[in-house]
């Protein structure tokens, strides 16, 4: 069992009776998890962060805790590490960090921002925000960074013990951790004084001691640990003695290592490099491939969660919904769809279906249901609901729509999952009147590069498209399907996009019921469903468009689609 697994096992059983049901899960609070990390038998590591974004990156990397560095947070605000940032400003940053992450945060609390009274208020506020613990150092307020200057003054031992007691008495979470940072070695006061202070702080109630050193080797640290004898967990910050092998810390009995300021320092180097490159070249070309894509920033900041929340909560306002039929593989695309359905093929760095969903969201359609089939596990997008047609390889589009029967009520949009269209097409459809309105492309799509075997859903309408801006006479569907008309006499092509009112959705559900009873449902496509409705006397209105959309049936379509977007 590796160290991390051993620590996790210890975390699960922390402070709980052996064999109890509760011991099978991690401590509920972040403070409880920090406590368990400090008391675990194996060495643990926490990483510096200075805002919500860097905190997310620390968690993403797999660290089990965050060090909220005073130096780094001050630097992020553009001020010195001398308590120039007020404790309330730091608290605000910590709130963003705690909200953005799920792992415990140990805060660099400097000296506690004053005397015992400041410390107890600080601890209360940290507990309210779900912070795991605070580390306070035995120096005077305002603090001076440990690596600046020599012979820095230290706090009186009894006064500092009062700060510790005040902090422990003020915590609202029993597991909240207070770490006492001993600066005697930094200040040149010697090992004996460091040990004397550490013991006094332990007796005052400190949950752990942080022994600090700015020597280039870890001799002071190992010497302290040997004399300390494990009386309480020991935390170290090996910034200056970074060449020391980590095994040395394990052998010495150190409980936790803090990587204290490296995210901030990395950010400074990276930002300087990018700024200089852009300044010199007056172009983004040199850096664009070296920096994180914007979509990674969106992912880190939870944009997909927002889309899912919008779909859940904004839909309650009664806005239109959408059903996307995306069960087919798209065998004509060959190896591109061996591991994913064609709706998930990449279009300029983003799945086709994601682009379609984004277009729908942009016009206010937040309740989106996708009917999955082939490689359904690959369709895992935020902001959608899904139903599955597990018989996708032996059924058609009508059967896929029937899988979403319980969500088929108006106003509702029904669309193929492998098409894209300009936003104005969708907005025009949503504004159109009628119980059933379908979109027809009035162009003649006879590109010579297309396969002669390609099936096109031609339509005949009550009248052809005129192109007149003033022509707003009603157009209705008369026939639809590959056999409805010859290309030369057809009025256009059905693009796979239809809007239903409440009454229109009722008509469609009725048609699906009838097709299921007479055995025609499994083999039917969406045009056959619409043709059945026309034959029953339903009025299906037509919205003419002239291009501004594409579907994906083969490699030619895919190339055209990438040019469209």
Image (cartoon, rainbow, N blue to C red):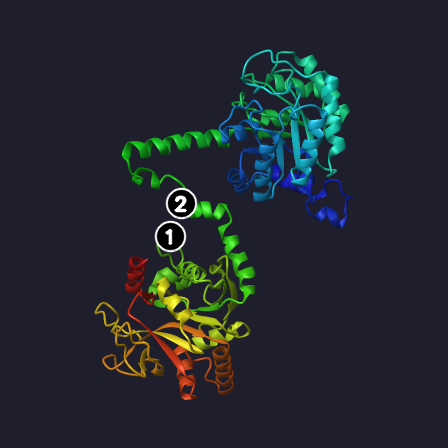
Residue position for label 2: 293
- Above or below — where is 560 with respect to 513? above
Q: Quadrant of the C terminus?
A: bottom left
In percent of width and height, residue 374 lies at 45, 66
Query: Going from the N terminus, do you reach mark 2 or mark 1 first?
Result: 2
* Contact check, label 2 and label 1, Cβ < 8 Å: yes
Element class at badge 2: loop
Residue at 48 percent of width and 48 percent of height:
299
Residue 244 seen: yes
Q: Nearer the viewer, residue 134 or 427?
A: 427
Q: Quadrant of the N terminus?
A: top right
- Above or below — where is 194 with respect to 468? above
- Above or below — where is 492 with respect to 149? below
Question: Is 548 on the left-hand or right-hand side of 354?
Answer: left
Residue position for label 1: 349
In percent of width and height, residue 335 lies at 36, 61
In percent of width and height, residue 256 lies at 63, 30
Q: Residue furthest front?
A: 470
């Amino acid at each position: 069992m590796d160290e991390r697994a051993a620590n996790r096992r210890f975390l699960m059983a922390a402070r709980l009776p052996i064999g109890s049901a509760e011991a099978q899960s991690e401590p509920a609070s972040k403070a409880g998890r920090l406590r368990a990390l400090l008391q675990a038998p194996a060495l643990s590591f926490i990483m510096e962060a200075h805002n919500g974004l860097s905190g997310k990156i620390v968690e993403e990397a797999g660290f089990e805790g965050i060090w909220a560095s005073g130096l780094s947070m001050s630097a992020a605000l553009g001020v010195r590490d001398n308590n120039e940032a007020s404790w309330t400003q730091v608290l605000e940053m910590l709130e963003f960090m705690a909200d953005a992450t799920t792992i415990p945060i140990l805060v660099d609390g400097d000296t506690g921002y004053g005397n015992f009274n400041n410390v107890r208020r600080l601890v209360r506020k940290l507990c309210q925000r779900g912070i795991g613990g605070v580390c306070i150092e035995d120096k005077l307020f305002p603090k001076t960074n440990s690596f600046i200057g020599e012979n820095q003054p230290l706090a009186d031992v009894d006064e500092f013990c009062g700060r510790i007691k005040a902090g422990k008495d003020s915590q609202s979470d029993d597991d909240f951790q207070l770490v006492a940072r001993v600066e005697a070695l930094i200040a040149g006061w010697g090992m004996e004084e460091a040990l004397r202070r550490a013991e006094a702080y332990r007796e005052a109630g400190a949950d752990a001691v942080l022994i600090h050193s700015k020597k280039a080797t870890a001799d002071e640290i190992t010497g302290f640990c040997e004399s300390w004898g494990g009386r309480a967990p020991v935390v170290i910050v090996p910034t200056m003695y970074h060449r020391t092998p980590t095994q040395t810390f394990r052998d010495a009995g150190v409980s936790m290592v803090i990587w204290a300021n490296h995210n901030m320092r990395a950010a400074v180097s990276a930002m300087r490099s990018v700024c200089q490159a852009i300044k010199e070249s007056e172009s983004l070309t040199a850096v664009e491939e070296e920096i994180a894509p914007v979509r990674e920033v969106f992912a880190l900041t939870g944009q997909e969660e927002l889309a899912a929340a919008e779909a859940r909560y904004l839909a309650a306002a009664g806005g239109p919904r959408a059903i996307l039929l995306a069960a087919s593989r798209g065998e004509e695309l060959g190896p591109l769809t061996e591991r994913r359905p064609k709706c998930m093929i990449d279009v300029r760095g983003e799945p086709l279906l994601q682009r379609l969903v984004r277009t729908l969201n942009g016009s206010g359609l937040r309740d989106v249901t996708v009917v999955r089939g082939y490689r359904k596990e690959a369709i895992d997008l935020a902001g959608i609901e899904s139903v599955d047609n597990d018989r996708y390889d032996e059924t058609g589009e009508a059967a896929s729509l029937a899988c979403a029967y319980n969500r088929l009520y108006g106003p509702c949009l029904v669309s193929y999952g492998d098409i894209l269209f300009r936003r104005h097409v969708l907005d025009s459809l949503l504004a159109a009147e009628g119980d059933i309105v379908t979109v027809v492309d009035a162009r003649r799509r006879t590109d010579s590069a297309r396969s002669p075997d390609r099936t096109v859903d031609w339509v005949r309408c009550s009248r052809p498209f005129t192109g007149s801006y003033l022509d707003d006479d009603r157009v209705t569907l008369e026939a639809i399907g590959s056999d409805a008309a010859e290309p030369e006499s057809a009025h256009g092509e059905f693009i796979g996009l239809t809007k239903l009112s409440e009454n229109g959705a009722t008509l469609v559900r009725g048609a699906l019921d009838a097709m299921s009873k007479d055995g025609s449902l499994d083999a039917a496509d969406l045009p056959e469903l619409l043709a059945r409705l026309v034959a029953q006397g339903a009025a299906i209105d037509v919205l003419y468009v002239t291009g501004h959309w594409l579907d994906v049936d083969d490699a030619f379509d895919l190339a055209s689609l990438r040019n469209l977007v």
